[in-house]
């Protein structure tokens, strides 16, 4: 007897369909598995056989062959346990042939027959729906993430027995055994976000830094914050995702897919809050960019559409930082393997923070006793190419106690988000039919088109260029930031004052060169 | 005569021996020819025991008078000159001081006897205020062709010398290493410029590394070459205080730039003022006082000596108020905005500050700090 069961494989963030073929023939009792299998897929045989036995199924002595097709695609992960078990049951005639037709199965089996969670349910279900598959049986824990996909019935199963009973049942009984779940993503998106106790109104003083954070969030510009310990750099960084425009459904599905593939979704159906990732500076290159024996998305992909915050920037290994250069440019990570290329998205806003010198108090010479070479060495630990990709640089001052006690609360995150939202709509209008989404994305070639200057402004920029010794790259960065500042002011043309404000935030390696 | 100079030069190059011992050798063996036949015991009879061995070893290294001459000839080919105390080129100012160096290595030129020099010294890690004062004084002196003497170090030293040279004046750098060693490396540009428009001086033979113990003796040459020493910024117990005590010992006038009592880098300066040092107010007054004190006619009399005042530039009222709020100590945008009587937003304040910066009235020090230019 022969059976074919549908399942899916992950290819980076995308998925493709896999057929699990099982043949049971007479001969010496044995079970062999083929189809370019990774270690954990080969181990699947032991799990499946034990789970079947413990679910009370007596295996007849047959020669069983399992093939995972397409056979040239490397199969990894534990999600094939359930489809193999179902295929085996069908091939041995435990339930009618039509029962499992058109159903996609995913799930890891425990030896007791329990179905355990797997990674990447969302992208696989999404791909299945695209190919017209109408029904999926997934681990109960992962049912939520699949349930947001429209036009497909998702059933969460707890153990193998449940699945078997479901497959043997007929008509309406099925729905009672494994009820299908649907979650309206639109409704999830509408739910108000709790700011999790982080609000900009709690940040006292630091008006320039807050202003820079607002500009950065509005135009998706990368931001560098310089300042002594305890000035509030991390405090501001943590609050940036909440003033960025809310995720659209499309963006949210992208982010959720990454988290699903990384196995970090838990029982959430959809990620509706912009991600905020703050890796420790000892992080390794694969952990940051993604990879590993079984490839998984790295921190930069988990920051997709959100904020990647690198605190204590000079403490990061240089090669770790340099590994981000290409992803920042391409907005995605490519992992090249013998078996093929994987692509993970990585369109994030980079927010960095650092002390101006080893002790942290420069240029306050009453507290800072670092020598000039020490300060230069510290600054030079930040790789130039990364600094080149930062649009705004802002300096924070140590907070005075009077300011903590007296200053009124600043603008709340909700107020700031409203301004950002307005700018985002302007940008949507501006970049319709282009590859760009935000002012921060605009490349040098398109500067003339989107950041055009009048004659007065041109003269102002010429002066800034010569007075401040700009490079071509920093010239363009000022234009981009000025575009966002003009958008925030609600002006169609970039004016001289916008350029000047943008020029103040220009990052330069001369920051420390007094 | 030539032999005698080379002998002196070679003797100085034995910098393991203190100056006192070198002079003893010179007295005991006026003719270098005698040296090379003498045994170790022979030296021990005239020199302190621990130095006799070293010197004997040194004699063995060159072997003969000819070996010594050849060695000294090589230095000349590299453009390194040497003067002894007997030479007419030897700076007169140095002759006056106690324990003057027997000879000096130099590249470029030496200060001439008709040149009245001023030494400017201060901290390597200086503040924006010190930077400003040092370059202002350096420029003023440079414009009036008063050479600036300093140690070519980072911070105040290098800044004042660079400013003097930029203004067309001369400057001399006295090093604590060989004249062919550029220390610190970051002053490479200044090092070249000094050789063209002034000179590099050292009491140490070429190739000597910048050892910490070389610097205090070097400082006595800095103060010795000048008629007055100006201390711009100094913390308490710094190298600058050594120079000051040497300057006083040499009878040089010591001027001190006062600072705020809260600034660590001005603590040493303010202490010196309390101890009775002269107060430096501005370059004009300083030069005026110097002329009065020394009846100097060597300083060009036609140079205007009025105090330089900062002119109020023509600005909009808002710009003017912000400009007035600026200081020579860098202030953050928020600090400036808070100190204004009319309330404007931080954003407007930063725009005005950038306008002032473009007009050359203000200076952006770091990403968020500005000071008066």
Image (cartoon, coloured by chain):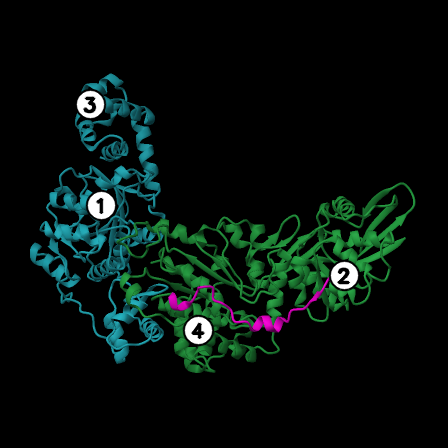
Judging from the image, mark 1 belongs to the subunit labelled B
Q: CA distance from mark 2 to mark 1?
A: 79 Å
Checking the image for residue A416, the label placed there is: 4
Q: Position of residue B343 (x, y in %)?
A: 28, 76
Of the numbered discs 3 and 1, the one sitting upstream in the chain is: 3
Q: Which structural element holds mark 1?
A: loop
Q: Position of residue A59 (x, y in %)?
A: 84, 46
- Labels 3 and 1 share a subunit: yes
Task: Please state which of residues B350 and B124 is positioned toward the viewer in this rendering.
Answer: B350
Q: CA distance from mark 2 to mark 3?
A: 101 Å
Quadrant where the C terminus of chain A is found in the figure = bottom left
Chain B: drawing colour: cyan
The answer to whether residue A218 of the structure is visible from this angle is yes
Chain A: drawing colour: green
Q: Which structural element holds mark 3?
A: loop
Q: Which structural element holds mark 2?
A: strand
Category of crowding for the residue at label 4, using alpha-carbon neighbours closer than 10 angstroms: few (below 14), some (14–19), many (at least 20) = many
Task: Please state which of residues B11 and A4 is positioned toward the viewer in this rendering.
Answer: A4
């Amino acid at each position: 007897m022969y059976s074919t069961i549908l399942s899916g494989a992950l290819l980076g963030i995308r998925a493709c369909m896999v057929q699990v073929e099982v043949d049971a023939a007479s001969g010496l009792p044995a079970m062999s598995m083929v189809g370019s299998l990774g270690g954990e897929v080969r181990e699947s045989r032991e799990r499946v056989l034990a789970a079947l036995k413990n679910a009370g199924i007596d295996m007849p002595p047959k020669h069983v062959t399992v093939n995972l097709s397409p056979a040239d695609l490397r199969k990894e992960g534990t999600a094939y346990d359930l489809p193999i078990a179902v295929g085996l049951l069908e091939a041995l005639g435990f339930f009618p042939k039509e029962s499992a037709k058109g159903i996609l199965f995913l799930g890891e089996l425990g030896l007791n027959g329990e179905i355990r969670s797997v990674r990447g349910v969302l992208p696989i279900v999404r791909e299945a729906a695209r190919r017209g598959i109408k029904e999926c049986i997934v681990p109960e824990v992962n049912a939520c993430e699949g349930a947001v996909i429209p036009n497909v019935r998702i059933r969460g199963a707890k153990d193998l027995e449940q699945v078997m009973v479901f497959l043997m049942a007929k008509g309406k009984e099925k729905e009672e055994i494994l009820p299908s779940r649907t979650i309206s993503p639109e409704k999830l998106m509408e739910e108000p976000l709790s700011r999790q106790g982080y609000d900009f109104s709690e940040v006292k003083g630091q008006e320039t830094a807050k202003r820079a954070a607002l500009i950065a969030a509005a135009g998706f510009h990368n931001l560098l914050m310089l300042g002594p310990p305890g000035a509030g750099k991390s405090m501001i960084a943590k609050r940036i995702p909440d003033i960025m425009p809310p995720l659209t459904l499309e963006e949210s599905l992208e982010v959720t897919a990454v988290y699903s593939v990384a196995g970090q979704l838990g029982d959430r159906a959809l990620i509706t809050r912009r991600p905020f990732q703050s890796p420790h500076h000892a992080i390794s290159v694969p952990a940051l960019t993604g990879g590993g024996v079984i490839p998984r998305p790295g921190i930069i992909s988990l920051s997709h559409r959100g904020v990647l915050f690198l605190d204590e920037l000079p403490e990061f290994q240089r090669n770790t930082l340099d590994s981000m250069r290409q992803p920042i440019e391409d907005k995605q990570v490519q992992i090249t393997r013998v078996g093929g290329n994987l692509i993970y998205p990585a369109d994030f806003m980079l927010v960095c923070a650092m002390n101006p010198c080893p002790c942290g108090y420069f240029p306050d010479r009453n507290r800072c006793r670092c020598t000039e070479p020490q300060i230069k060495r510290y600054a030079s630990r930040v790789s130039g190419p990364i600094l080149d990709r930062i649009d705004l640089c802002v300096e924070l001052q140590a907070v005075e106690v009077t300011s903590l006690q007296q200053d009124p609360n600043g603008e709340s995150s909700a107020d700031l988000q409203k301004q950002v939202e307005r700018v985002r709509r302007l940008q949507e209008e501006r970049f319709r039919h282009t590859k760009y989404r935000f002012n921060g994305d605009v490349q040098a070639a398109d500067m003339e088109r989107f950041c055009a200057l009048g004659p007065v402004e041109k003269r102002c920029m010429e002066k800034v260029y010569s007075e401040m010794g700009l490079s071509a790259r920093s010239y363009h960065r000022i234009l981009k930031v000025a575009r966002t500042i003009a958008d925030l002011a609600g002006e169609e043309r970039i004016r001289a004052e916008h350029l000047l404000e943008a020029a103040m935030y220009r990052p330069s390696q001369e920051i420390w060169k007094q | 005569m030539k032999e005698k100079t080379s002998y002196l030069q070679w003797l100085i190059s034995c910098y393991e021996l203190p100056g006192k011992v070198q002079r003893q050798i010179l007295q005991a063996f006026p003719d270098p020819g005698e040296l090379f036949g003498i045994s170790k015991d022979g030296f021990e009879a005239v020199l302190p025991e621990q130095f006799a061995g070293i010197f004997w070893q040194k004699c063995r290294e060159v072997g003969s008078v000819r070996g010594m001459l050849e060695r000294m000839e090589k230095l000349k080919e590299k453009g390194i000159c040497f003067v002894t105390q007997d030479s007419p080129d030897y700076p007169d100012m140095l002759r006056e001081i106690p324990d003057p160096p027997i000879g000096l290595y130099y590249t470029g030129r030496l200060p001439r006897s008709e040149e009245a020099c001023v030494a400017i010294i201060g901290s390597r890690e200086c503040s924006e205020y010190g930077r400003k004062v040092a370059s202002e004084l350096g420029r003023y002196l440079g414009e009036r062709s008063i050479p600036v003497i300093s140690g070519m170090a980072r911070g105040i030293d290098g800044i004042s010398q660079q400013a003097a040279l930029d203004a067309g004046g001369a400057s001399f750098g006295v090093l604590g290493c060989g004249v062919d060693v550029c220390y610190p490396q970051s002053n490479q540009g200044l090092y070249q410029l000094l050789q063209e428009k002034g000179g590099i001086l050292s009491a140490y033979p070429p190739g000597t590394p910048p050892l910490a113990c070389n610097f205090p003796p070097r400082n006595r040459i800095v103060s010795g070459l000048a008629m007055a020493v100006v201390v711009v910024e100094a913390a308490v117990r710094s190298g600058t205080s050594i120079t000051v005590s040497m300057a006083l010992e040499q009878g040089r006038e010591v001027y001190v730039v006062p600072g705020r009592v809260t600034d660590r880098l001005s603590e040493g300066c303010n202490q010196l003022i309390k101890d009775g040092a002269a107060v430096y107010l501005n370059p004009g007054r300083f030069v005026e006082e110097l002329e009065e004190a020394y009846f100097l006619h060597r300083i060009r009399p036609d140079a205007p000596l009025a105090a330089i005042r900062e002119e109020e530039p023509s600005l909009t009222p808002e710009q003017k108020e912000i400009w007035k709020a600026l200081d020579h100590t860098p202030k953050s945008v928020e600090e400036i905005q808070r100190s204004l009587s009319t309330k404007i937003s931080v954003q407007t304040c930063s725009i005005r500050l950038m306008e002032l910066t473009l007009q050359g009235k203000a200076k952006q020090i770091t990403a968020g700090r500005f000071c008066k230019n």
